[in-house]
Image: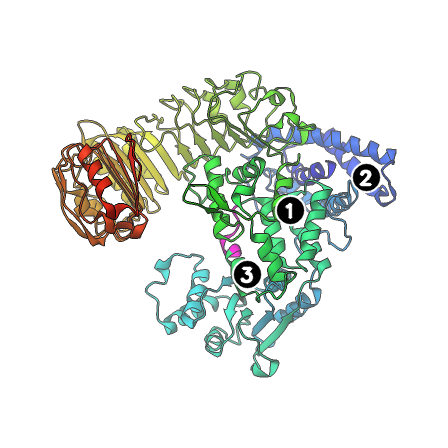
């Protein structure tokens, strides 16, 4: 659609005037500008569907925009090296870099701002006329970031904030749940922020004074870390710290979102205010409603009324402008939902969340959940509360395959603060779990037979999400061979399907290509599918998991200069070409479960954050040249690295790592590697696999480490002594450790341990009695204890939350431990395989274990 291209061109045209002279060709810029100006002057309102003149202009502009987009995308890799400067205030001046000549910047800044405003207004007009897709109302201003709803309340708050009277320093904004109080305050603050030299927005948690002050202090510190407030529990001290911070600024604006309205809190807030500093405090209040007579002279109250249906529709259209609704029928469905909500902004938030499928702001979603809990109990089925709760009851199992890929792709783009250790498909599963936790999806009820017993998938939200996922603008499809208009497709997901459409179609806008094929049946030609330049030059995400590809084309990979996610897991590739160095925007490389042994030499990638080379417990590892990550300072995941002397020293530079997995660690690496790990304050997952014949010493590791998951393979010195002090551990795996002391006795006091896997980790003959401990343990695996002969008992206070017990390949153990029937509070699942027949018989004859699920693998009887 031409309106989508025009929205992109509005940004790119503005940036193009900052490029060096002669780039791009002046005739392209001139012709596109002329076409836009002529179309602006054209009477769009008078046209009808048979207006051939408008159709001619539309085709002309479409062709010009395609030319412009192709040219800009080819140059983007070069333009990103241009340095920024602060000489220009143009919104899009830094989109592709700025012109090095400051005199030209200053002369063209004003002109470009005017051009942007004119294009913005024209874009809204085109979107309202062409195909009747999105914005149809003329009341939306050209600056769509400011939504003209609830004008009276916004203006009243704006006036109050600008008053210099020191006795009106605290302003309460009140209203019913879901009336849009936070939005009113945000709009007003945007209009007056230039009159204040500092603004702090605080999301208040808790209802006590100390909770409120703690929330304010954390926001002032711009951190949520408990370490800044754990020692500051004194109310007076907290208040003084906040007061000193705020009054460093001559005029400040403090917004307290969700604060309880009580006298103690108001008196605490008054301590922040000094008449000579001109500070203002806005309280978005919750709790009981007071009258104006109950307030003191220094407090002003503003009442926010409910949203009208028209205002709600306008709010949705402005909020979803960047989402590009795929069709007119989708917009009609949305209008029906918003109307049936009677203007509920909760319903709008949910719809926009489904459309965007991104991991939204946790604080914002938490607030939605809190508002839902405070909604009144519905009296009838048409109340706002009942409508909103009705929309939230969606089920994962009710989604079609295309809907699942719709969300999976949304979870496949790594964020800077995330730690993706799985493919986009698995990331999509995590995203669904997050949506379930936020009450956006309802979890299905599953019977003991693993069948779906009950799962409510209610309309219209489910049908709306399915409809969005199957449209061409998004094109999340399991088999896209029937797509009639491939040039508009942005994302394609194919599972066990044919790739004929990929060979013949011209994908001008494709951003994500996901090919899932666990059976390796896809016939992906190295030359004919995607390596032909420039068919997929705009590609950002490429996942070819499980395909039969054996070699990556040198020129083909080098042409994907915008690629950010490269997933080649479970393929047949043996190496990557040197042209990988051209992908300077690449953030994630996933080559797990392949035949690769090393990454290419003479390659340096500066933006790589996640390097997934091999699974943590696999026998393989990949050699990474020392200079491969020399330009990157934000690596968060380094999994499957083959250790050598140079890397033992160089890994110190990457102190921001969240996950580290190294293999072939030798004795001489111990000191340097431990020193590096101690400096990684953000490290949460650590895997170390020792080289045979070598022993790794962890004695110098800090006891205050914040490790959550630890895997140690091979001989490790001081293992039990050191690991038993890691109180933050949630998951621990040991294999080939050959310990002579009982590991269960050493680890039983770890307070947060949930999963413990021991494989060939103990060479002793007996496990000591466990009378207490393992307070949170849910999964215990004991595998390949070849010398084990006796496990005496498990006390009634030990392993009370155990859910799964796995016993495997312990041929000397003839009897199960006493007290097994007391574990897990009746929810224990015991799995026994490759064990002595005596222990199998003992488990079958123990009638007290009938309430458990006991599975004998490779046996004929299941209890």
- Res 39 label: 2
The residue nearer to you, when weighing 116 against 513, is 513
Q: Which residue is mark 1?
A: 90
The residue nearer to you, when weighing 180 against 677, is 180
Indicate which disc, 1 or 2, sits on the residue closer to the N terminus: 2
Segment tinted magenta in the rendering:
359-365
- C-alpha distance separating marks 1 and 2: 24 Å
Q: Residues within 10 Å of mark 1 (few under 14, many from 20)?
A: some
The residue nearer to you, when weighing 168 against 301, is 301
Q: Secondary structure at mark 3?
A: helix
In this view, the mark in front (1 or 3): 3
Indicate left or right for 689 with 306 as reference. Answer: left
Q: Secondary structure at mark 1?
A: loop
Q: Position of residue 575 (x, y in %)?
A: 41, 20
Indicate which disc, 1 or 3, sits on the residue closer to the N terminus: 1
Q: Which residue is mark 3?
A: 372
Quadrant occupied by the N terminus: top right
User: Which residue is rendered at x = 28% and y = 46% of the image?
Assistant: 850
In this view, the mark in front (3 or 2): 3
Q: Does the magenta portion include 206?
A: no
Indicate left or right for 350 with 62 as reference. Answer: left
Please, is residue 391 above or below residue 420 in the view?
below
- C-alpha distance separating marks 1 and 3: 41 Å
- Res 394 label: none
Indicate which disc, 3 or 2, sits on the residue closer to the N terminus: 2
In this view, the mark in front (1 or 2): 2
């Amino acid at each position: 659609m031409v309106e989508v291209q025009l929205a992109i061109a509005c940004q790119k045209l503005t940036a193009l005037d900052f490029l060096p002279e002669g780039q791009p060709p002046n005739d392209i810029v001139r012709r596109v500008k002329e076409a836009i100006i002529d179309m602006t002057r054209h009477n769009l309102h008078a046209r009808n569907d048979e207006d051939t003149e408008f159709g001619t202009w539309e085709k002309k502009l479409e062709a010009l925009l395609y030319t412009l987009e192709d040219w800009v995308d080819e140059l983007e890799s070069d333009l990103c090296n241009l340095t920024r400067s602060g000489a220009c205030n143009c919104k899009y001046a830094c989109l592709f870099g700025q012109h090095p000549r400051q005199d030209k910047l200053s002369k063209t800044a004003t002109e470009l701002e005017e051009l942007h405003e004119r294009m913005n207004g024209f874009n809204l007009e085109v979107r309202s006329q062409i195909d009747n897709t999105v914005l149809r109302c003329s009341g939306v201003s050209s600056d769509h970031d400011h939504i003209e709803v609830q004008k009276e309340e916004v203006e009243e708050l704006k006036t109050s904030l600008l008053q210099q009277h020191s006795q009106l320093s605290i302003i309460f904004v009140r209203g019913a749940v879901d009336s849009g109080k936070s939005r009113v305050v945000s709009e007003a603050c945007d209009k007056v922020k230039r009159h204040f030299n500092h603004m702090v927005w605080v999301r208040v948690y808790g209802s006590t004074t100390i909770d409120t002050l703690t929330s304010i202090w954390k926001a002032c510190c711009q951190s949520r870390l408990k370490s800044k407030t754990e020692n500051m529990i004194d109310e007076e001290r907290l208040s003084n710290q906040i007061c000193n911070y705020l009054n460093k600024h001559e005029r400040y604006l403090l917004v307290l979102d969700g604060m309880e309205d009580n006298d103690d809190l108001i008196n605490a807030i008054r301590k922040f205010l000094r008449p000579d500093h001109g500070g203002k405090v806005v309280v978005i209040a919750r709790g009981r409603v007071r009258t104006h007579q109950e307030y003191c002279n220094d407090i002003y109250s503003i009442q926010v009324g409910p949203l009208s249906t028209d205002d709600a529709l306008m709010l949705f259209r402005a909020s979803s402008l960047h989402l590009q609704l795929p069709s007119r029928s989708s917009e009609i469905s949305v209008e029906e939902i918003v109307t049936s909500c009677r203007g509920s902004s909760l319903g709008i938030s949910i719809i926009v969340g489904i459309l965007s499928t991104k991991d939204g702001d946790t604080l914002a979603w938490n607030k939605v959940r809190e508002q839902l809990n405070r909604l009144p109990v519905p009296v009838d089925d048409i109340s706002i509360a009942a409508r909103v709760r009705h929309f939230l009851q969606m089920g994962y199992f009710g989604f079609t395959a295309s809907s699942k890929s719709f969300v999976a792709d949304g979870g496949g783009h790594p964020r800077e603060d995330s730690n993706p250790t799985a493919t986009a498909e698995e990331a999509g599963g995590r995203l669904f779990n997050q949506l379930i936790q936020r009450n956006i999806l309802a979890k299905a009820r599953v019977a003991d037979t693993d069948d779906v017993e009950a799962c409510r998938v209610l309309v219209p939200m489910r049908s709306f999400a399915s409809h969005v996922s199957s449209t061409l603008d998004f094109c999340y499809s399991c088999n896209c061979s029937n797509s009639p208009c491939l040039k508009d497709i942005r994302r394609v997901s194919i599972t066990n399907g044919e790739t004929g459409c990929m060979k013949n179609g011209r994908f001008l806008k494709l951003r994500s290509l996901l090919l899932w094929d666990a059976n390796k049946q896809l016939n992906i030609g190295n030359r004919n599918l995607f390596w032909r330049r420039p068919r997929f030059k705009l590609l950002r995400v490429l996942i070819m998991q499980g395909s039969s590809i054996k070699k990556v084309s040198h020129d083909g990979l080098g042409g994907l200069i915008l690629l950010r996610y490269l997933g080649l897991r479970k393929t047949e590739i043996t190496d990557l070409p040197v042209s990988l160095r051209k992908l300077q925007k690449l953030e994630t490389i996933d080559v797990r479960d392949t035949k690769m042994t090393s990454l290419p030499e003479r390659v340096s990638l500066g933006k790589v954050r996640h390097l997934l080379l091999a699974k943590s417990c696999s026998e393989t590892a990949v050699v990474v040249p020392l200079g491969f990550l020399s330009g990157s300072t934000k690596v968060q995941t380094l999994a499957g690295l083959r250790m050598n002397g140079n890397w033992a020293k160089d890994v110190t530079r990457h102190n921001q790592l969240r996950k580290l997995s190294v293999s072939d660690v030798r004795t001489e690496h111990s000191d340097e590697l431990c020193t590096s790990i101690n400096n990684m304050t953000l490290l949460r997952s650590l895997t170390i696999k020792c080289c045979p014949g070598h022993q790794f010493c962890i004695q110098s590791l800090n006891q205050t480490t914040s490790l959550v998951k630890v895997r140690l393979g091979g001989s490790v010195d001081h293992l039990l002594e050191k690991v038993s002090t890691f109180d933050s551990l949630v998951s621990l795996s040991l294999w080939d450790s050959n310990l002579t002391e009982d590991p269960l006795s050493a680890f039983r006091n770890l307070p947060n341990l949930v999963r413990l896997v021991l494989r060939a980790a103990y060479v002793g003959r007996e496990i000591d009695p466990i009378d207490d401990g393992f307070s949170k343990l849910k999964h215990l695996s004991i595998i390949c204890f070849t010398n084990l002969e006796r496990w005496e008992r498990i006390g009634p206070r030990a392993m009370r939350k155990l859910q799964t017990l796995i016993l495997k390949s312990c041929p000397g153990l003839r009897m199960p431990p006493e007290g097994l029937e007391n574990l897990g509070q009746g929810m224990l699942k015991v799995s026994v395989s490759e064990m002595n027949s005596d222990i199998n018989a003992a488990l079958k004859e123990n009638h007290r274990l009938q309430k458990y699920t006991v599975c004998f693998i490779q046996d004929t009887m299941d209890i």
